[in-house]
Image (cartoon, helix red, strand yellow):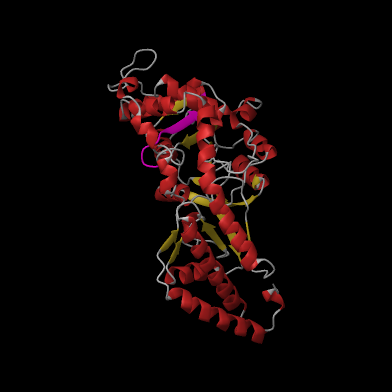
């Protein structure tokens, strides 16, 4: 296709008018399509229904005799800690099992740091005046909403296919003691689908923070979510930290929200022994323990081994991969050569990041909405919901049916062309 950049003003206007006629026809179809959130589709959730059919008699006692129906086991049952320690490449003593939400564990860690401080820190974050957080962008909007709620100043850190700009991270972390943390989605990042390179992980481990209470929030949400034959490699952050004695700097999180049931999975918080012991003392005031029946149910369903989880995720991939292919193939067919945008092509995760011309994202999202296609709000992948270039749109392919997705992405491409032409005109 001929580049829009090479068209004359008159040719661009003629193209815009022709596209608007197609757009008006699309609006008449009365679409009610949703690509706004990274939710598993019902057929993905159906894969885990057998978990609920397990014999209740096998879900009463742990191997050491603990009755999971009763109080106790604040850090979770040993079998669950062992399972997820294997997934994360850690030891059982490094694991705390939470409820169904890793986001809740992250929120709680911020709250505790704000009120009580962190292990090795001089005093609580909330008593130190201005507090800052680094935010790789584009990133996960719910991370940013947590820090915004506490009035923490958020600083944009540009992303590349290797991860955050580590020269800039190092500049902030090692020279400004008010920088207390950084949000990270290190494997199949939200929304670009990038995986941090070994050099990036090593650079994180080697940081020498000016603050004695700096923490890396390592949200490893997509650690088991590869859907291609080639799964990205992510270096173990704690292995890297051991070389520098910096294990206390990291909180790692994961969950089964997109593995089994989003509303009834299990979540994991991993950390150094110092951090785990410190956090458990505070958690013991908050709760006597999380849902141990659900922990044991997950363990038995996966056979107590990480291999069971990966085998399950191969089944998930059979649903997810074709949907990503629909989006990627349509973007290629509709937009290649126009020079109005680029997009990522991840090997896993839940999102594709589209980068349009500056000043087009809000307009494209609005055009899509008016045509019945709901997208994540423009600006959502940035702190305060403000995309400085108004160019990034997160595409979430998993929830719609393939047929719905095909229609949705065609409308998206149409709207992206219109928005680009309007901006160029």
In this view of the protein, can residue 184 be seen by the observer?
Answer: no
Rendered residue at 30%/20% (across/down): 57
Q: x and y percent of residue 133 in the render?
A: 52, 46
What is the x, y in percent for residue 221?
A: 51, 40
* Tag count: 0
Q: Give the range drawn in magenta.
A: 262-272
Q: In this view, does 302 lie to the left or right of 54?
A: right
In the image, is residue 135 above or below residue 177? below
In the image, 364 versus 157, the foreground residue is 364
The residue positioned 50% from the left and 32% from the top of the image is 309
Q: Position of residue 254 (x, y in %)?
A: 48, 36
Q: Which of 312 and 415 is in front in this view?
A: 312
Q: Among all residues in the image, which is located at the extreme top? A: 64
Image height check: is 202 above or below 277? below
**Residue 201 seen in the current view:** yes
159 or 324: nearer the viewer: 324
Q: Farthest residue to the bottom: give it.
A: 10
Q: Quadrant of residue 358?
A: bottom right
Q: In which quarter of the image is residue 45?
A: top left
Judge whether residue 122 is colored magenta. Answer: no
């Amino acid at each position: 296709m001929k580049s829009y950049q090479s068209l004359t003003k008159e040719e661009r206007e003629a193209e815009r008018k022709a596209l608007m006629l197609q757009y008006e026809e699309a609006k008449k179809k009365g679409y009610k399509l949703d690509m706004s959130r990274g939710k598993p589709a019902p057929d993905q959730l159906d894969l885990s229904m057998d978990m609920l059919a397990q014999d209740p008699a096998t879900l009463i006692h742990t191997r050491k005799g603990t009755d999971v129906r009763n109080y106790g086991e604040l850090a979770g049952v040993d079998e669950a800690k062992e399972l997820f320690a294997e997934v994360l490449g850690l030891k059982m003593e490094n694991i705390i099992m939470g409820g169904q939400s890793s986001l809740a564990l992250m929120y709680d860690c911020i709250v505790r740091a704000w009120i009580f401080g962190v292990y090795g820190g001089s005093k609580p974050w909330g008593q130190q005046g201005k507090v800052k957080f680094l935010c790789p962008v584009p990133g996960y909007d719910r991370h940013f909403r947590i820090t915004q709620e506490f009035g923490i100043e958020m600083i944009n850190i540009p992303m590349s296919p290797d991860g955050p700009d580590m020269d800039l991270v190092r500049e902030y972390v090692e020279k400004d003691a008010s920088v207390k943390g950084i949000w990270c989605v290190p494997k199949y990042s939200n929304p670009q689908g990038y995986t941090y390179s070994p050099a990036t992980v090593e650079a994180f481990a080697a940081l020498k923070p000016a603050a004695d209470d700096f923490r890396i929030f390592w949200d490893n949400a997509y650690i088991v979510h590869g859907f291609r034959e080639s799964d990205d490699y992510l270096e173990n952050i704690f292995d890297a930290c051991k070389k520098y004695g910096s294990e206390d700097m990291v909180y790692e999180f994961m969950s089964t929200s997109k593995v089994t049931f989003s509303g009834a999975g299990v979540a994991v918080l991993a950390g150094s022994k110092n951090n785990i012991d410190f956090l458990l003392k505070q958690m013991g005031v908050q709760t006597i323990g999380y849902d141990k029946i659900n922990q044991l149910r997950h363990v038995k369903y996966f056979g107590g081994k990480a291999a069971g989880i990966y085998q399950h995720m191969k089944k998930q991939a059979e649903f997810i991969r074709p949907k990503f292919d629909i989006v990627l193939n349509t973007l290629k067919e509709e937009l290649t050569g126009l020079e109005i945008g680029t997009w990522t092509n991840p090997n896993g995760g839940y999102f594709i990041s589209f980068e349009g011309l500056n000043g087009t994202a809000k307009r494209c999202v609005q055009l899509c909405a008016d045509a019945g296609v709901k997208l994540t709000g423009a600006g959502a992948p940035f702190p305060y919901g403000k995309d400085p270039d108004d160019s990034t749109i997160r595409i979430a392919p998993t929830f719609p049916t393939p047929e719905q997705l095909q229609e949705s992405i065609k409308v998206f491409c149409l709207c992206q062309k219109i928005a680009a032409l309007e901006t160029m005109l």
